[in-house]
Image (spheres, rainbow, N blue to C red):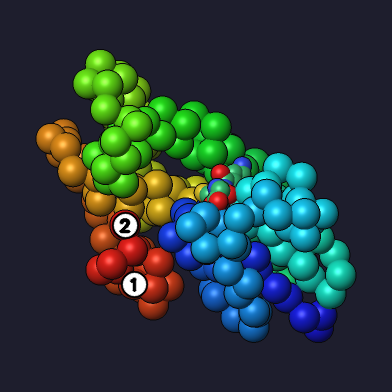
Amino acid sequence: MDDLTILGRVTSINVRKVMWTADLIGLAYENEIWGLPHRDPREAEFLKLNPNAQVPVIVDGGFVLWESGAIMRYLAERHRSGLFPTDPRERARVDQWMTWQATELNPPWMYAVMALLRRNPAYADPERIADSLARWTIGMRILEGHLAQAGRFIANDRMSLADIAIALSTHRWVSTPFDKPALPAVMAHYEALKGTAEGRKYMGEGTP
Ligand SMILES: N[C@@H](CCC(=O)N[C@@H](CS)C(=O)NCC(=O)O)C(=O)O
């Protein structure tokens, strides 16, 4: 098999998505640490790999790929891991929740996470924090409704790429200090994944 390098910092949840996927498949890889405050992805060397100046990027035997969801799907498919089902409907369900996590659930939290978790003084507008938390909470309630029905896993009653992406989102929710509504089904899903070796590695103490 080709040598695999994952470029990115493990503090990024998009990088964790890829590392968790690779770990679960059992892939050996090298981690080149890129991303602020370590190595600036706007350096020319990095921009040649990803013109978006964002992590993660993988180089798999010379094949370069960016976008965390695309990388997860590629690794799962290439190594036939079962984390991305082959049945079209089962696969679409996994894809639906992965896409929702990246495009609907995550963007609203940005301001609140910078303010309350990162404590970045540039994010201090109370109205914007409240708006960010309100929109984030709407997404998390949608997830609660789904998991209350679906049970232990996000899709198809078994572990998939969607569980990785969603658990990492929930981790951010848990790690950000504010008054949260109770979401018992979401928490049960999160705790179950946190109990796995990869869950401990990517959502344990000291990994906000
Ligand atoms: N849609 C992209 C988003 C990637 C992204 O937002 N990466 C952030 C970290 S989570 C980044 O590279 N920030 C700049 C940095 O770390 O220096 C993906 O899912 O891969």
The reply to whether callout 1 and callout 2 are in contact (CB within 8 Å) is no
Please tell me which residue is depicted at 40% across the width and 47% down the height of the picture.
Answer: 169
Please tell me which residue is depicted at 64% across the width and 79% down the height of the picture.
Answer: 30
- Most foreground residue, 180 or 155: 180
Q: CA distance from mark 1 to mark 2?
A: 12 Å
Q: Which residue is mark 2?
A: 208
Q: Say which element carries label 1.
A: helix
Kind of residue at disc 1: Arg
Q: Classify 93 as above or below 68.
A: above
Kind of residue at disc 2: Pro
Q: Is residue 83 visible from the viewing direction of this image?
A: no
Across and down, in percent, residue 70 comes to 70, 50
Across and down, in percent, residue 54 comes to 63, 48
Q: Say which element carries label 2.
A: loop
Give the label on residue 200, or none.
1
Across and down, in percent, residue 172 comes to 33, 48
